[in-house]
Image (spheres, grey):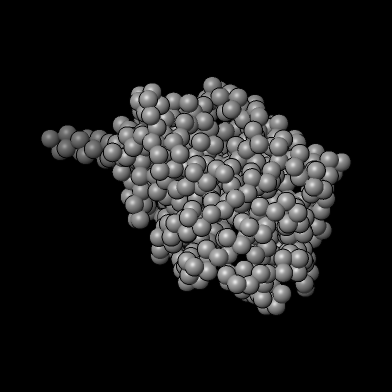
Amino acid sequence: MKKLIKLISVVLVMVLTFSVSSVAFARDKKATPVIVLHGLGGSDIYQYMGTENEVKIPQFGLDVSAMAKNQTILDNAVKLFTEDQTPDYYALFEALGDYFEGTNLNFNENGNPKKGQGIKTYWEEPLSKHKDYLTLRDFSIPVIARQTSSLIGAKNVYAFNYDWRVDLCQTAKKLRKFIVAVKKRTGAKKVSICALSLGGAVMSAYFDRYKTKKDLERCVLLNPAYLGADVARAFEFDLQTDKKKVLPYLKNMEQDFQGGDKETLFKAISAIGDDRIANALDNLQKDVLSNTKMRKKFFLEVVKPWVGNIPAFWEVIPYSEFDKCVKKMVKIGYLDKNSGLYKKIQRYHKVQGRFKKNLKYLKKHGVEIAVIANYGTGGLPLTSKYSNHTDLLIDTKYASVGATVAKYGKKLKGKNAKGKYASPDKVINAKTCVLPNNTWFIKGIIHGLYTYDGDAAKFIANLTVGNVKCNLKAVKKKYGYTQFLKGDKEQHLTNVG
């Protein structure tokens, strides 16, 4: 009997040991490395790098306090908001142009950064070596990186940071080098990508050149800019503004940013007062936007020295509008067709035209793809397309790669309002998307403003690490989520009813 008891004990220990080791093995199973890509403005840009004069360039070249110290800018800005005074636009444009040129944000005429400029956050190590990045911001791609790290550990998550001004095809080459380095470091055959906004456009260029490399396991594209944004129609002088549209837009933004880091900015704008803002809008429409001579002067003296040679701004022009925009800017002397910049933006324009075909190719060859396009906000009221549904910045129809979307405040009618891909609120029909079974829509979450531990960030992270397949059926079965979701202020997700 004693021998039998000993034998049973040994067997039990072996079973227990095997069970524990099996659990441990399951936990230690090597995760596919995840690489996150930020969008426009996601990395700080420095000039005079490595010297005693090293300094950060103001984000997008905008330093309100510095601009307010310029008396010419300040005096004429005040006049702009009054009903009975007229700004000296010639002096204002010259002063703004001098200020923007002085920031050195702009590139040279060949679309290249000036010597000594770059970013200080390019690492090929995982984020376990750069933990500060995970709490760098309480929104945008650092939040997604942190949420993803909570699932698979920061040692398996990498951030591809890049100079967001640079031509997207050049950035795609750097991404290729980065992916090769991550694969070598980890021994992984493939990586997974989560790209936000302009990062989605980087992936467009990557797909076009490297889609046959078979190094992508899954790719999650968040509010991506690969097909552009209609606000870029400003390049073809599609410029118009109206206080009846702008004032409600600003009120909406103030409400949306309550409690966020931009709350103070929108409250400050609101504090100017509706009457003063209305006066400024009326003055701009009458004196600049509707005046051919002043419109041209504004672009040449203010916009060109600011961002005129930065390829990324050209490369988010919608494909269908590109030729019109280029023609207009060449005509007024804003763009030189013999420049290196022109060659760069033409190259990406062709890439953009092949994007839908490339996306289908990847899906066909086993890459899991998820597209997330937000909606619920009207477009920026500066062009004729202000009534498009957007996430504040990117038009929903472009981000989703082809959804049929109602005008903001309107509903779809007839056959567009019916079928399994039609949203219950009759705003979107996803049937016309390139990948309708791999595309989700989230209502009410502003561009990139994902919060840590919110349902939206968790959903994105679980898609990215492969905890659920990137298709409607699998997501519905696991989480109960349909194709059309909405988020509240805490970013709890519920199905659109």
* Residue 306 in picture, x, y percent from top left: 73, 58
Quarter holding residue 29: top left
* Residue 148 placement (x, y as % from top left): 46, 48
- Residue 380 seen by the camera: yes
Q: How many marks?
A: 0
Above or below 233: residue 352: above
Pick the front one: 335 or 102: 335
Give the residue at the far right of this rendering.
338
Of residues 241 and 412, the one nearer the viewer is 241
Look at the picture and state if 216 lies above or below 194: above
Determine the residue located farthest toward the front in the rendered image.
Answer: 84
User: Left or right of 220: which side holds 39?
Assistant: right
Q: Quadrant of residue 374?
A: top left
The C terminus, quarter of image: top left
In terms of depth relative to the viewer, which is nearer, 289 or 400?
289
The spot of residue 61 in percent (x, y) is 68, 63
**Residue ID at (66%, 75%):** 74
Could you tell me which residue is drawn at 57 percent across and 33 percent down?
216
User: Where does the image place residue 388, in percent across and percent down from the top left?
Assistant: 50, 42
Q: Is residue 25 visible?
A: no
In percent of the image, x 44 and y 43: which residue is there? 408
Q: Quadrant where the N terminus lies?
A: top left
Most distant residue in the left direction: 1
| Residue at left offset 48%, top offset 31% | 403
Tell me: residue 265, above or below residue 445: below
User: Is residue 461 toward the left or the right of residue 312 in the image?
Assistant: left
